[in-house]
Structures are given as structure tokens and as C-alpha cells.
Amino acid sequence: MMKKSLFKLIISVALLSLFGVVFTQVYWVRNALYLKEEQFKGSVLIGMKSVLNQLILLHNDSTLKQLQSPDPCIIEKTHVTDVIRPDRLDSLMRLEMGCMKINKDYEYAIYNKRTGRFSMGSYGEDTDNLIHSEHQISISALFSPGDYYMTVYFPNQQAMILKQILGWMLLSAGFIVLVFLSFWYTVSTVFRQKKLSEMKTDFINNMTHEFKTPISTISLAAEMLMKPEVNQSADKVSRYASVVFDENNRLQKQVEQVLQIATIDKGEVKLKLRSVDIHRLLDKATEIFDLQINEKNGHIETRYQAEPGEISGDRMHLMNVFSNLIDNAIKYSDKPPVITISTESDRHGVYVHVADQGIGIATQNQHLIFKNLYRVHTGDRHDVKGFGLGLYYVKRLVELHQGNISVESEPGKGSRFTVFLPYINEHNPVSDE
Ligand code: ADP
């Protein structure tokens, strides 16, 4: 068995490494985003410069043509529209953006930075974005008067950049989630196994202890029976024989309980279904405990309201189910046991409540008590005997009857177990309602 501190150390190192991996991944993704952004800016700048160059070439061409024409009168170019034709700018822009695979998600303009006046372009109402855009170049090489700039703005710039690395980001996030899930699964499995192994050790210790007592009592009684002064007295023989008989019965019951669980786990339990009058069954179950309850100055109260009270079930197993619940109600009462057994019904089936005023069960343990071998730990004291098999058996059996079991409990006040058994189940599809 791995040492507890070593195990804790390994988990801490693994967790730390996991967080380290996440941190590095986040760092690289941020880095990649930054680089993509720079790359985007560079491409846009190259595109804008190319547009500007082509505009310069076109402008030079037209000036040359004009000079070669028969009437080369030089027109003074005082306005930016005299050197740039908006439709040409538009087609050049479209061409360059097309090269960057951007179709319509952009605005552009030629504007005067000093006056804030827009001369041409394609843009919406809000020109602020264009004025403050990071993609701007001066067009002074083409048109120097004033302070004219070509500006481009991408309303979805972030999304466009993100889209380029989204695949990688999702892949890395997916792997991180997978690693976390596997880590969580591994750790929880180890903890579950550890808990199970503790419960098994507890169970074996408990069982050895429980078996040892009747065995040594039987051996003592047998020893006495062999003594001539004892076996000559019929009275003494019968007394010791009854001790052997009782202890043997106890042992048999315990062995049966353990074996029964093995049968349930293998799925080998076959219910012998018959019509069962639940009230008569409960009366019989309480009778068994009458002596024990009287000895402890307690009492059992019954309140039967289920109508009809017949269900289809296995009498022997149902008897065990309710005996287990009553036995627990007595075992886990620190005062004289006061137990109420009540029934009610609806059109689906019968509800049997077994309530006690005992020690109760803390909320965090309530869903665990139905697990195999589970026992609520009361410190190191094992003053109440048991194997932790009872409620597991009860739950499995009730479920085999297509019913269910639940518990409400408050520590110090008591517990109330409710068993529901349906009128109609798979084995008895016809209701006798
Ligand atoms: P066992 O009684 O042999 O320990 P069970 O499966 O019958 O095993 O019960 C599991 C645990 O549930 C018990 O160890 C006990 O802590 C708790 N428990 C069961 N019934 C009651 C009850 N009526 N009141 C308080 N605790 C109970």
C-alpha cells in the first residue's frame, strides 16, 4: 500500500504540472494571437501601399497622356478627386482585400487628417473608427496639398484573427479538458478503491469478531456437555444444548447473510412471487422482535392504512427486508427503542414507513448507507454490531420487486425509511385493484 504522504505528494505534483501545462498553453495562445495580429497589420499595410503605388502609376499614365495630347494644357489639380477616381480606388481596394480573403468586412476612405473631411471611400455613419484606425498611410506621394491619408478599418478584425487560430485553440482546450477529466477519473478511482479496501478490512475484522464469539461459546458449551457431572443431569444437558443450538442459529444467520449478498451480486436471486398481504407480513416481522424490544423497555407501534394491502412479492425476502429495517431501528437507538411502522398507498403501490427515534444519520452519509459494506463510522468504537450488508440487501431486494427505498433522518432525532412496493410489476402485470 502506497504511503499516504507519498500519494498526496504525487497528486500535488501532478496537479501542479497540469496547471503548468494550462498556463503554458494560455501563454502560447496569447503569443500566437499577438503574432497573427502583427501579421495581419503587415499584410494590410502592404495591401494599402500596393493600392497607393497603383494609383500613382495610373495618375502618372494619365498625366503623360495629357501631355502627349494635341492640347496639353495643364489643368491644375487642386482637389484629391482630381488625382484619384473613387471607382478606381474601390476596385483596387477590392482587389487587395480579395488577396487577403476579405470580402466585405472592411471600410476605407481617403480623408484629410487636419480638417477631418472625408473625400471618398466606402464607409458607414460612424467615421470615428476610420479616423482612429491603426491602418493608415499618408498619400502625400500622390497628392501633397493638405494632409491626406488613406485609412482602412475592419469592424471584425479580432474575430477574423481569432478565426485563424480557433481550430488550434479548441484543439488545445479539448486536450486540456481531456487530461483534466482523466486525472480526475484516476484520482477518484484511487480514492474509491482506497475506501473500498478500508471497508473490506473493516468487514473482515468485524466478521472474524462476530464469528469468534458464537464459535467459542459453542466450544465451551460442548466442553461442558462432555463433562460427566454435566451430562448426567438432563436439566444441564438441555441448557447447554440450547446454548449450542441458539449460537449455531446465530452463526447460520450471519453466514447466510454474507452468502446472500454474494448471490445478489452474481444476479442469481430468483424471486418466488406470490400475493403477499403486507400487513400480515409486517405483523410477523414485528413479532420476532417483541422479546428484544420488551427487554429494552421500548415499543413498536403500527398504523396500517394501505388499501389494498396485497402486493406481488417474495415472502421470505420481504420478511428479511422489513426485519433488517426493524433490527436497525432497534440497534441504532440509544434510548429505549420507539418504533413506528405505518403503511399507506396510492394507485401505484404500497408505501411502508419504518421510523425510529434513534441516533439518526448525518445528511452526508444518507446516500452511502445503501452501499455494500458501508457503515457509518462512530470514531473507533464499534459498539453496534453489523457487517454493513443489511441496507444493501434491502435496497437490492426492493429494486428486484421494482420498488425503491429512501430515508429521511436527522442526527439525534431519528430516521424514517420508506419502502415503496408497486402493485404492478414486470412479474405481475395484472393489478388486482
Ligand atoms: P449494519 O447495520 O450491519 O452496519 P446496514 O447496511 O444495515 O449495516 O446499515 C448501514 C449503516 O447505516 C449502519 O452502519 C448505520 O450506521 C446506518 N443505519 C442503518 N439504519 C439506521 C437507523 N435506523 N438509524 C441510524 N443509523 C442507521
Image (cartoon, grey):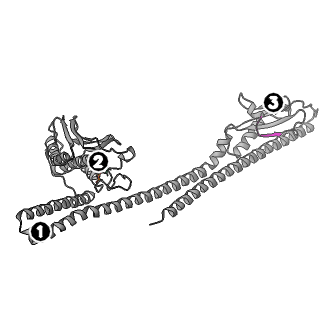
Q: Which residue is mark 2?
A: 332
- The C terminus, quarter of image: top left
Ligand 1 within 8 Å, label 2 CB: yes
User: Quick one: 171 or 411, which is closer to the camera?
Assistant: 411
Q: Which residue is mark 1?
A: 225
Which comes before the other along the chain, label 1 or label 3? 3
Decide whether residue 259 is among the magenta residues: no
Give the mark toward the camera: 3 or 2: 2
Q: Residue at x 53, y 56 (%)?
A: 179
Q: Which residues are magenta?
A: 132-137
Residue 241 in the image: x percent, y percent?
11, 63
Q: Which residue is mark 3?
A: 119
Give the mark toward the camera: 2 or 1: 1
Relative to 209, residue 121 above or below: above
The mark found on residue 324 in the picture is none
Which comes before the other along the chain, label 2 or label 1? 1
Q: Amino acid at mark 2?
A: Tyr
Q: Is residue 350 visible?
A: no
User: Quick one: 29 or 154, which is closer to the camera?
Assistant: 29
Q: Residue at x 62, y 46 (%)?
A: 163
Decide whether residue 133 is among the magenta residues: yes
User: Quick one: 102 or 83, which is closer to the camera?
Assistant: 102
Give the crowd class for mark 1: few <14, some 14-19, many >=20 residues within 10 Å.
many
Secondary structure under the numbered disc 2 in the rendered image: loop
